């Protein structure tokens, strides 16, 4: 399982996020996606912890908590949606 962390400050670092989640257990991985064109952080992250119990405790305590002047959105990450071979767009097109 992975944790989605949204509404992050654009100045957050992986080390700072690791420090927050380490209070709930072992942090295995922190991923801060960046915009492909600008390289700027996108305002959300994914955190993986040692056990599901640690992840559940972090989600319970941190969802809605204020950190770096923002109210965090913390919940279980959903599986990535498949966009197909054309990267999305309109469906059921008629030519």
Image (spheres, rainbow, N blue to C red):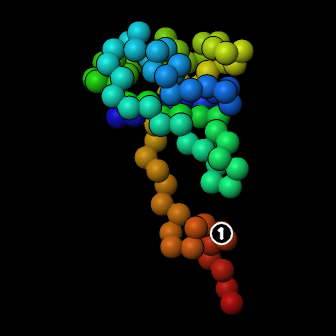
Q: In screen coordinates, is 50 left or right of 58?
A: left
Question: Is residue 45 something that shows in the picture?
Answer: yes
Q: Residue at x 51, y 27 (%)?
A: 14
The answer to which of 6 and 17 lies nearer the viewer is 17
Question: Is residue 60 something that shows in the picture?
Answer: no
Q: Position of residue 89 (x, y in %)?
A: 65, 69
Mark 1 neighbour density, 10 Å: few (under 14) some (14–19) many (20 or more):
few
Q: Quadrant of the C terminus?
A: bottom right
The answer to which of 64 and 21 lies nearer the viewer is 21
Position of 80 relative to 10 (above/below): below
**Residue tagged 1:** 89
Position of 91 relative to 66 (above/below): below
Q: Quadrant of the N terminus?
A: top left
Q: How many marks?
A: 1
| Farthest residue, direction bottom | 95
Position of 18 relative to 42 (above/below): above
Say what secondary structure mark 1 lies in.
loop
Q: Residue at x 59, y 34 (%)?
A: 44
Q: Residue at x 72, y 15 (%)?
A: 69
Q: Name which quarter of the figure residue 92 lies in.
A: bottom right
Position of 61 relative to 50 (above/below): above
Q: Position of residue 85 (x, y in %)?
A: 51, 73
Q: Residue at x 33, y 14 (%)?
A: 25
Q: Position of residue 73 (x, y in %)?
A: 59, 25
Q: Position of residue 33 (x, y in %)?
A: 55, 42
Q: In screen coordinates, is 15 left or right of 71?
A: left
């Amino acid at each position: 399982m992975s944790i989605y962390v949204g509404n992050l400050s654009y100045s957050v670092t992986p080390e700072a996020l690791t420090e927050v989640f380490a209070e709930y257990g072992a942090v295995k991985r922190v991923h801060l996606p960046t915009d492909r064109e600008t390289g700027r952080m996108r305002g959300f992250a994914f955190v993986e912890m040692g056990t599901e119990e640690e992840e559940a405790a972090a989600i319970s305590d941190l969802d809605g908590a204020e950190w770096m002047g923002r109210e965090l959105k913390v919940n279980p990450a959903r599986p990535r949606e498949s966009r197909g071979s054309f990267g999305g767009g309109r469906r059921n097109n008629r030519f």
